[in-house]
Image (spheres, rainbow, N blue to C red):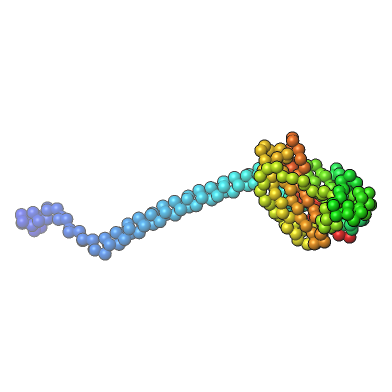
Amino acid sequence: MEEQSPQENKEQSQPDQPQPQPQPQKHTLITILIAIIAALIAGIAVYIALMYSENTAMEETEEVSEETTEEAEDETAPEITAPPFEEETEEEETEEETQIDWNTYTNEAYNYTIQYPAGAEISEAEKSDFGLSQEMKEEGFTIDKLYQTYTGELCVTIGYDLGYVMISAPPNNEEFIVRCGRSGIAYETEEKEETLTIDGKTYTATGFEELGPGDTLDSHNETMIVQLDDGTRIEYGSKSSNTATFDDYLEIRNTIVSIVESFESV
């Protein structure tokens, strides 16, 4: 065998030297970074989606709760059976039905009718209510002859509750034969007027409200007058009373006006 030299032995006994490792390439690092960023973006997207889903669920829950509350309020709310205009219509129909049941006064001497409610009192002028003017006396008239000529139907009074209506036929307006209306005024007055429909025509009634001390009808009252085309004079208003007030009269005033408007020529 050949003997090896010490140098060769030394070389053979030395351990293997570590081999240099290859350096990672740049594109590998970039890929990793991109993967990390993509993962972060995906995580954020998932988080946002979860939050949106949770908020939507909460909103839907609130809407359902509100709907349930509204339904409960609707169930407990009072039920309206009729609108106001229907109630007014029913009142008007009731008033019309009531007026249909009224009685009718027919004045055969002066050819008219007028309606009045139950409880009203009808009266015609008495002979003692007639008076003679000087001219009538000179013409030879007497009270008996005057009453026989014009009759008590010359002045008709309808009294209802705290109000009245007085109808004076045309001959009484041409010359004073019988008093058929208010006789005097004691206190300050306030002028008034209103529009009425009588016998298919429109008229303006004029008059006054007497404004005396206190609230009773003795001092605070009303008198209205409407003159028709044929000469008929209709006076209406409140009666005298030391206990009832003007406000009491106003409660039945519409009925008094309805009596006046029921006048018809025949």
Q: Where is residue 135 in the image (x, y as percent from the top left)?
A: 85, 55
Q: Which of 99 and 139 is in front in this view?
A: 139
Question: Which is nearer the eye, 4 or 168?
Answer: 168
The single residue placed furthest to the top in the displayed view is: 243
Number of numbered discs on residues: 0
Residue at x 53% of width, y 50% of height? 60
Residue that lies at the very extreme toward the front in this rendered image: 138
Q: In this view, does 100 lie to the left or right of 46?
A: right
* Residue 152 image position (x, y, % from top left): 90, 50
* Quadrant in which the C terminus appears: bottom right
- Position in image of residue 65 (x %, y %): 57, 46
Residue at x 78%, y 57% (from the top left corner): 227
- Residue at 85%, 44% (x, y): give it: 120
Residue 109 figure quarter: bottom right
Q: From this viewpoint, is residue 138 visible?
A: yes
185 with respect to 50 (left or right): right
Corner quadrant of residue 34: bottom left
Determine whether, in the image, residue 40 is placed left or right of residue 252: left
Q: In this view of the protein, can residue 114 be seen by the observer?
A: no
Residue 113 falls in image quadrant: bottom right
Task: Specify whether 199 is left or right of 250.
Answer: right
Give the percent coordinates (x, y) of residue 249: 74, 42
In the image, farthest residue toward the bottom: 27
Quadrant position of the N terminus in the picture: bottom left
Q: Which residue is drawn at 80% across and 55% down?
A: 233
